[in-house]
Image (cartoon, rainbow, N blue to C red):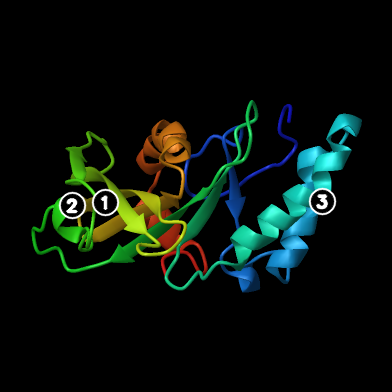
Amino acid sequence: MGARSVKQTFPISFDSDRWVRVPVAFADEQWATGDEWAEWIADELTLGRESAAEFRDPLRDQAAAIAAFPTEHVSARFWFFPVDGDPAGWVDVYVQQRDDDGADAAALLPDAERTLIEPAVDALAVPSFDDAVRRLTLAPIGAGSEAPGILAKGEWAAVSGDWAVYLVSVDDDPRRLTLRLDDIDALFAGIDPHGVAAVPGGAR
């Protein structure tokens, strides 16, 4: 879509040529609703580009759909929108203060439940965290239906003192999730849990 015209300010270091921040607490934003934000972001993403005019309404609809997903306890949401590619999925960020009981990051991951293969759990070296891991799973969906499928899920967990950080991104096409893994790794590494908590409505 060309160079971004959107100015993003948030206590998570992220590449605005790869991500668009989606508001999760509209009482703290300049937009009253997700639909209002979607209208604005669609205009911003197509500003000054006549060739992008036909994409404006589909982008608005996609943005509105992402903003409409539940945001309970979500500290931040980012829409994967690479400047040199097509928008594909999003990631939710959870930041929470907790008792520092010495638990490692892997212990914070929720139960994987039913999976097609053994989940892949990898340790990540992130200087801002005491411990960090990434888990990738493939789960069956629609079993017994006429159109069964696969749900790919990426989860990132970290501990930093008395703070816990958790990210999750899912996709019904494992290839799309794979394409954004490196970008989510970079987003994960740019999180300052103390900074997120300082934002009104941030660590919720």
Q: Amino acid at mark 3?
A: Asp
Q: Is residue 187 above or below residue 63?
A: above
Q: Amino acid at mark 2?
A: Ala
Residue to which mark 1 is pinned:
157
Residue 105, labelled with which disc? 2
**Which of disc 3 and disc 1 is earlier in sequence?**
3
Q: Residue at x 73, y 60 (%)?
A: 37
47, 65: nearer the viewer: 65
103, 106: nearer the viewer: 106
Asked if the residue at tag 1 contacts the one at tag 2, i.e. Cβ–Cβ closer than 8 Å, the answer is yes
**Secondary structure under badge 3?**
helix
Q: Amino acid at mark 1?
A: Ala
**Which of disc 1 and disc 2 is earlier in sequence?**
2
Res 43 visible? no
Q: Is residue 12 above or below residue 24?
A: above
Instruction: Give x and y (percent) for residue 50.
Output: 91, 32
Res 46 visible? yes
Residue to which mark 3 is pinned:
57
Asked if the residue at tag 3 contacts the one at tag 2, i.e. Cβ–Cβ closer than 8 Å, the answer is no
In the picture provided, is 100 more to the left or to the right than 139? left
Q: Quadrant of residue 38?
A: bottom right
Instruction: Count all numbered tags in the image, as a single digit.
Output: 3
**Secondary structure under badge 1?**
strand
